Image (cartoon, rainbow, N blue to C red):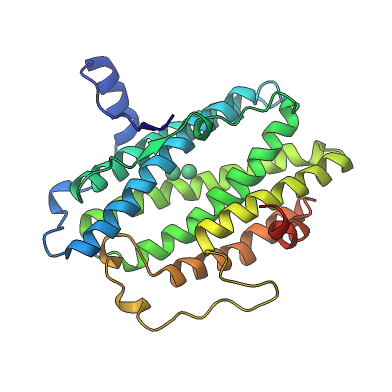
Amino acid sequence: MARPVALGTDDKLFRALHRRHVDGGRPPPPWGALRVDALDDATRERLRAAWSARVAAEYRSMVVFSELLARMPEAGLPLEVSCAASRLVADEARHTEYCARLADALGGRADATVTDDDLRLADGALSARLFVARWTASMFCVGESASVGLLQALAREATDPCVRAVLDALLRDESLHDRFGWALARAVFPALTDDEREWLGADLAFAFAHYDRQNGRSLRPDGAALPDEPVGCDAYAGATHGVVAPARYARAWYERLDAVILPGLAALGVPAYEAWALRHEAR
Ligand SMILES: [Fe+2]
Ligand SMILES: [Fe+2]
C-alpha cells in the first residue's frame, strides 16, 4: 500500500531533537529567498514533480540505511562503523525535509508516496556479511557515488539562492556518504569468497540496470561515447531551481560511472565491468 511521507509532529521533544539533527549547527537554507513567482505553470509543475520524487527517494534512503545499519554488528563491523552510519541516517532525514519544503513551495507533494516494499531491504536468505556487501555495492558505491556527480550538475546551474543552498547542503552530505561507502566497501569486500564476489557481480547488474534507467535513461549504448547534448540544454526551463535537461543529467551519470564507480568497484575485486555489460539481461 502506498502511503505519503509523513512529516510534522506536535510533540516538543521529537521536534527539538529533529531540529538539532537536521540543522546541525549550520544556518538553514534561506527559505524566504525562494522565488517561484516567475516560473510558468509547466516549469513549476516539472520542478514540483522532481522535488516531490526526491522526497520519496531521500525518505527511502533514511529508512533502508537504518536496516543496513542494523545488520552491521552481525556482519562483524566495529562500533565506529555503525556510529558513522547513524550520522548518515540523520543526514537523509535532513534531505527529506529540505526536498519537502521545496516541493511544498512549488505546489505540493501528494505524490511523494512509498510502499512497504520500498522501505524494506530484508532478505532472510542472505548472510549478514553478504547482505551488507550487496547494499554497500549498490546503494553506496553506485547510488550515493552517482548522486555526487548528479548534484554537482544541478548545483552548477541553480541560481535561485534558496535552491542553491539546499543543493549545496545535499552535496556536502552526499560527498561524505560517498566517502563512507567506499570505506565500507574496503572494510567488507576483501573478506568475500570468490563465489560471493561472483554473486555480488551478478546482483550488481540489476543495480546498474535500475540506476541507468533512472539517471541515464539508458541513453548510452555499450561501447559508445558519452551522449551528445542536444540544443537547448543551456537554457533548460527549471535549471535555475534544480532540474537540468535530461541529456545533461545523463551525461553527469555516465561521467561519474566511468571515472569513479566502475574503476572503484573493479579495484576492490568486484566484477563491475562485467556487471555493467550484463545489465540488459537483468531487467
Ligand atoms: Fe540523500
Ligand atoms: Fe546520501
> Which residue occupies the extreme right position in the image?
194
Based on the displayed image, in which of its 4 quarters is residue 241 positioned?
bottom left
Q: What residue is shown at x 35% (from left), y 41% (from top)?
A: 112
Please state which of residues 232 and 84 is positioned toward the viewer in this rendering. 232
Tell me the quadrant of the picture where the N terminus can be found. top left
Q: Position of residue 164 (x, y in %)?
A: 28, 57
Residue 81 located left or right of residue 228? right
Please state which of residues 222 and 30 is positioned toward the viewer in this rendering. 222
Residue 258 located left or right of residue 52? right
Q: Position of residue 155 (x, y in %)?
A: 35, 62
**208 above or below 5?**
below
Q: Is residue 24 visible?
A: no
> Which residue occupies the extreme bottom position in the image?
231
Q: What residue is shown at x 44% (from left), y 43% (from top)?
A: 57
Q: Is residue 171 visible?
A: yes
Q: Position of residue 119 (x, y in %)?
A: 50, 31
**20 above or below 11?**
below
**38 above or below 96?**
below
Q: What residue is shown at x 55% (from left), y 49% (from top)?
A: 143
Residue 21 located left or right of residue 101? right
Q: Position of residue 74 (x, y in %)?
A: 70, 21
